[in-house]
Amino acid sequence: MENVPGQAFPPSAAAHGARLRGMRSASRLLVLLLPALTGCRTLYVLRSAWFEAELLSSREPIDRVLAEGRIEGPRADRLRLVPEIRAFADELGLASTRSYTSVALSWDRRILNLSACAPLSFQVATWWFPVVGRVPYLGFFRPQDAEAERVRWEARGYDVWVRPAGAFSTLGWFRDPVLPEMLDWDEARLAETLLHETAHATLWIPGSVSFNETFATVVGEAASLIWMERVHGPDAPGVARLEADRADGRAFEALLLDLYDDLDVVYKNLDESPAARWEARRALYDSLEDRVARASWNDPDRARAAARRGPWNNARLAQYRTYHLARDGFDVLLARAGGDISAFVDAVRQVVDGARDPWKALAAATETAVPLSDR
C-alpha cells in the first residue's frame, strides 16, 4: 500500500506483527458480521469486512511510531496528544478501551458514509447490522463503491448524501486506530472526536442511532471544552474561539432543525398535490441562506459559507438531525450533574435503563419535549 503524503518513512518491520494480529481480528470481524449476511447484501458485508480488516492490519503502536521518529512537526505533536486524551477520558469516567493506542500511518483510504431518504418525506433508508442494530447510513472504503450505491438509490428516486467520516469506530469491539488525516486536525477537533467515539463505547443503545449520536455529541463537546480549559487555561484565546464556534454551531443546529420541522409539516400535508409539495420543498431549501442572513453569528462569513456548501436535500438534513437531535434533555441532565461527565453518563444510563423509547424516557425525566418527528 502507498505511504500517505507527508509520511517520512515506510512502515517498520514490526508492522508485520501488527498485520498478523490484524488478520486474526479480521476472522473475528467476519464471525461478528456473518449474521448480517441474511439481512444485507452479502458482497457489501464481505467487502466491508475485508477493508476493515485491512485497516486493522495496518495498525502500529503510537509509542513505537513516535520513538522511531516516523512523523515530525505538528502531526507528531497531535499524535503525542492521543494517549493524553485517552487518559483524560478514563479520568472522566468514560469507557476504558484499547482503541486509539495505535495509528494506521500506512493506510491511505478515506471512509465515506452514504445516507438516502425519500424526496417528499423523511423516510430514511436503514440497514441492520449486528451489535449496532439498525442504522441510517452505509460506510464505504472506496469512492467507486459509494458512487455505485449513490447511483442505485438516485435511480430509485431517493435523495442521497455522501460525506467523509472523520474517524473509525467499532464501539470498542476492536482496537480502532487513529487515522492519518486526524493528525492534521487542530487540538480541539482531535479531542472532541476521540471523546465522542469513546462515548459510543461507553453507552450505545442498539437501533437508537439518533439518541446515541446526540448523546456522544454532547459528551464530545462538553469533555473537549474541559480538556482545552485544563491544558490551556479558561481564559486562553483558543478556548474563547472554541466557545464562540460552539455557540455558532448550536445556532446553526437550531436553524437546520427548524428547517427540518418546516419541511416535515409540508411533507405530511397530503391534502396538497405532490407538485405543490415539491414547490414548497424547493422554496424552503432556497430559504436557508436567508435564514442564516437573518440570524446572529460570531463568525457570519463561516455561517454563510456553511449554508452555501451544498447540496442540501432530505438525506443530508435527516443525517444532520441524527447527530444533533433535541439536545435539551441531555443539557438538563448535564447541568444537574454540575458538568461532571461521569455523573452525567450515569444519569443517562439510569434514565434509559429498561426504557422502550430512550427519547421518551429522557423527555419524561427532564420535562423536555420529545423530538417532533419522534412523537
Image (tube, rainbow, N blue to C red):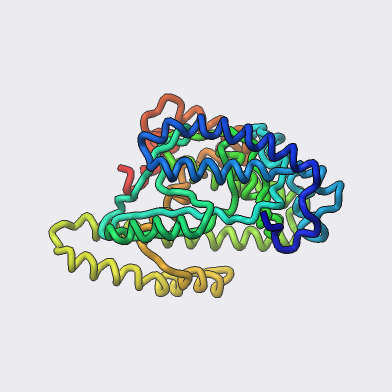
Q: Is residue 361 left or right of residue 217?
A: left
**Image: 82 above or below 340:** below
The foreground one among 126 and 248 is 126
The residue under the point 78% across, 54% down is 10
Q: Where is residue 261 drawn, in percent x and y?
A: 33, 56
Q: Where is residue 53 drawn, in percent x and y?
A: 59, 41
Looking at the rendering, in which quadrant would you find the N terminus? Answer: bottom right
Q: Is residue 78 left or right of residue 117?
A: right
Q: Is residue 42 left or right of residue 242?
A: left
| Quadrant in which residue 284 is drawn | bottom left
**Image: 100 above or below 77:** above
**Image: 48 above or below 252:** above
Q: Where is residue 147 drawn, in percent x and y?
A: 43, 60
Looking at the rendering, in which quadrant would you find the C terminus? Answer: top left
The residue under the point 73% across, 51% down is 229
The residue under the point 69% across, 47% down is 226
The residue under the point 60% across, 55% down is 109
